[in-house]
Amino acid sequence: MKKLIVILYFLLITVFSIGPSNEKIVKVSEYIELGGTSQWIMARGTDSSNPILLFLHGGPGFPESPFAYYDSKEIEKHFIVVNWDQRGCGKSACPELPLESINMDQILIDAKELIEYLKVRFGKQKIYLIGHSWGSILGINLIQKYHEDFYAYIGMGQVISMAEGEVASYNYALNRAIDANDTTALEQLKSLGPPPYNNYDQIKTQRAILSKFGGAFKSITYGDIIKIMMASPDYSSEDKKSFMESFMKIQNLLWPDVMKVDFSNTFLRYQIPIYFFLGKYDHGCPFELVEEYFAKIDAPYKEIIWFDNSGHWPNIEEPYQYQKALIEIVTKNNTRSR
């Protein structure tokens, strides 16, 4: 009898330590074909019955995947979190890729193919979509055209009107430089002149001055962002080198497309819930424009969620609050296993 009890004890230990729950863990890092070219995705989650959350990264050309270790551990308990290095950047960088194929229309086609792939692979009817900065341009276009694919949309660092936003961003930096009597920054800004800008070097100069005066972040710098990326366990040394090289190339290729974007008087009706994650110190994609747009749109549900200690990257500056907000959204929608 004693021997039988011991055997049963070890059987129970085995069941609870390596049982069905482990079979539900999602840990995928792979290349798939999208739009006729190989592109890299990473999917992580503790339970495959949870809904998918697809992150559309910013930049253009600045993947979120090397930051997932930093800002996604808690949401991986509630979602299958999918990061995708868009064509031509990050782990999807490819020297043979024709430059003319790197454009907004093609990336939207790639995104739709990815969404269909994810729904089939994980047996889902719909997904959650979050778009950051450049990714928020893609996100708005996708939910307008394919709303039936989505439970809800989250726009973070949401782009509304690039032309208007860039002028507001420039003026913010200029006014702060005047207030601080910073002659160096004033000379740089006057040398640049007001936007629009045609190349990455001009954008980089303006954003560096903006950051200096607290218009991009609250408590971190661009240098901190790079340090977090460089510490990523999901990127090799070669991947990290490729990250920066491809980012600069993609910026120059796509910036003309980006500057044409203006949602301020279009796409005012939505078929799904809309959430905007706004950093109170974001003057790169000015939060004021998002507030104005939010007041005009019609949706089944809409909400602004403020991040009081963030600029353009709430997921990096306030990772706990960012993940908490996403968990509250999925809890509210009760979309497990659908």
Image: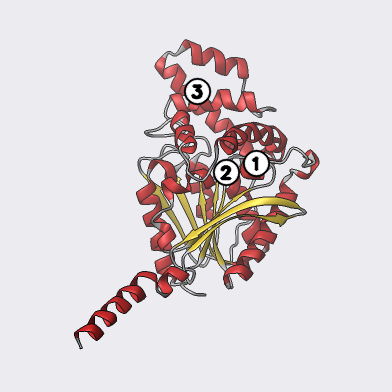
Residue 138 drawn above or below residue 119 = above
Name the quarter where the N terminus is drawn. bottom left
Q: Which residue is mark 1?
A: 89
C-alpha distance separating marks 3 and 2: 23 Å
Of marks 1 and 3, which one's residue comes earlier in the chain? 1
Of marks 3 and 2, which one's residue comes earlier in the chain? 2
Give the number of the disc on residue 63. Answer: 2
Residue 63 picture location, percent across and down = 57, 43
Residue 127 picture location, percent across and down = 56, 65
Give the number of the disc on residue 209. Answer: 3
Residue 228 picture location, percent across and down = 45, 37
Disc tally is 3
The amino acid type found where label 2 is placed reads Pro
Which residue is depicted at the point 46% across and 28% down?
223
Which residue is depicted at the point 42% across and 58% down?
75
Q: Mark 1 touching mark 2, by CB under 8 A?
A: yes
**How many neighbours does mark 1 have within 10 angstroms: few (below 14), some (14-19), or many (20 or more)?**
many
Q: How is the image coloured?
A: secondary structure
Residue nearer the viewer, 35 or 234: 234
Q: Mark 3 touching mark 2, by CB under 8 A?
A: no
Residue nearer the viewer, 322 or 84: 84
Give the number of the disc on residue 158. Answer: none
C-alpha distance separating marks 1 and 2: 7 Å
**How many neighbours does mark 3 have within 10 angstroms: few (below 14), some (14-19), or many (20 or more)?**
many
Which residue is depicted at the point 49% across and 38% down?
229
Asked where in the image residue 310 lies, by quadrant, the reply is: top left
Element assignment for label 2: loop
C-alpha distance separating marks 1 and 3: 26 Å
The amino acid type found where label 1 is placed reads Cys
Q: Residue at the left extreme?
A: 2
Asked where in the image residue 88 lies, by quadrant, the reply is: top right
